[in-house]
Image (cartoon, rainbow, N blue to C red):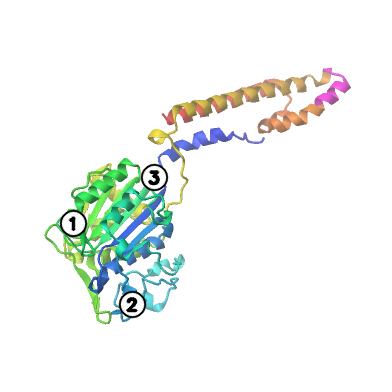
Amino acid sequence: MRLLSLPTPLLAAISLPSLSDATHTSNWAVLVSTSRFWFNYRHMANTLSLYRTVKRLGVPDSQIILMLPDDMACNPRNTFSGSVFNDKSRELDLYDQKPDTPTQESAEGGDIATESETSETTPQIMPAGIEVDYRGNEVTVETFIRLLTDRWPASHPTSKRLLTNSQSNILIYMTGHGGDSFLKFQDAEEISSHDLADAFAQMHEKGRYNELLFMIDTCQANTMYESFYSPGVVGMGSSARDQSSYSHHADQDVGVAVIDRWTYYALEFLETRLNSTSADVRLGELFDFMTFDRVHSDAGIRADLLEGGEEAARNRRVLDFFGNVQGVDVEMGDGGRESLGDWRADLEALRRIGERTKREMGELNVTVGAGSKVSAREAGADRSVLPAMRVEGDVLDMAASTGGSGWLKKAIGGTSLLLLGAAWVAGSKMR
């Protein structure tokens, strides 16, 4: 007996309640270095290291905004022209990334941004080069605020805009020199924690994010998220008030520090624990990994703005912010659900489908049952009609092979009840 082929509207109605809970359908990353000049080499390396990690985990360049105020790779002081490294082993060029190929050196080396040995079964192929969206004098407080709030003139390139919506998770990473509730931009201006808080509030009012993870590596970093008041924001910082954020190590050949401690250990966690895009690692594990012994300062978190508080934040998957999302974006109406009028129209359409099917199958039953009483000419005419009716009602063509009119009526009634029952169940779940 052939299975009943349910109409498309009913299939959508049955499956939609499970999809309605999936409010997170895309991930974006905004990675910002705010320092220029050669002695701030490590801040560019910090940012490019995070850039490489989110790309490795599947976030495409079209959903990454990269802001670099200086080009360390082309600085005349750079002994390794055209390259930027985050480790003194210099095994990985962050500026001109090549496809990763497991080697004996990378298995033994100390570069925290290389693939772990466990990833040999699922190698990650990285595209070469980087895509910088804002560089040099374009990296300003005004540009950053405009980026977050999407306040651009019509002529602004879409590739340099943060095209998020209420179903987007956003990772914002910032690094540079800062102090109590401020972060310097290129030693020329500052952005305060209040500026950031107001920008996030505008983003929330305009429906530009679902949840937002804010990470900052600077002196007194934890003071930068104290003023936040918008829901759905989680903050992570490298140091408490009156504490410095330290570099991890220097490269004697480069001549300056190449990475900061907090970012170094964040990368170590991400590169060793997230070996694939399906790794089930939670933010709580990342929070616990950033200890004083590693960072040499009091790394902090703030999660009270997230629904469910710190416990909910700790249970969020790291890949909810650092990885790509493979899902279906279902267009919804006000309040995250389609309007009640649309659902009523769909249910009415399903009711008409059920009635039409019942009527057609009733006519088919009469034709088949009266076959022995009609003339040969009428029987031939009936046979000429049956194939067309069978095609039109293909969802129930098993009825054509049955001779019992009572069984057929029961089947028709049961099918109609199933259709209408499933439709009303789907409608009630969406209220």
Q: Which residue is mark 1?
A: 182
Q: Which residue is mark 2?
A: 90
Would residue 272 be seen by someone viewing this image from the given angle?
Answer: no
- Residue 300, how many percent across, how many down? 20, 55
Ranked by sequence position, the earlier of labels 1 and 3 is: 3
Q: Would you say 156 lies left or right of 262 here?
A: right
Most frequent secondary structure within the magenta stretch: helix
Residue for point 25% across, 43% down: 230
Mark 2 surroundings: few (<14), some (14-19) or many (≥20) residues within 10 A: some
Foreground: 116 or 337?
337
**Amino acid beneath label 3:** Gln
The CA distance from mark 1 to mark 2 is 33 Å
Mark carried by residue 167: 3
- Residue 422, how many percent across, how many down? 52, 29
- Tell me the quarter of the image containing the C terminus: top left
Question: Which secondary structure lies at badge 1?
Answer: strand
Mark 1 surroundings: few (<14), some (14-19) or many (≥20) residues within 10 A: many
- Tell me the quarter of the image containing the N terminus: top right
The CA distance from mark 1 to mark 3 is 29 Å
Question: Which secondary structure lies at badge 2?
Answer: loop
Would residue 114 be seen by someone viewing this image from the given angle?
Answer: yes
Q: Is residue 321 magenta?
A: no
**Amino acid beneath label 1:** Phe
Q: Which residues are magenta?
A: 373-382
- Residue 275, how many percent across, how many down? 39, 63
**Amino acid beneath label 2:** Arg
Count the numbered circles shown.
3
Q: Quadrant of residue 8?
A: top right
Q: Quadrant of residue 229?
A: top left
Ranked by sequence position, the earlier of labels 1 and 2 is: 2
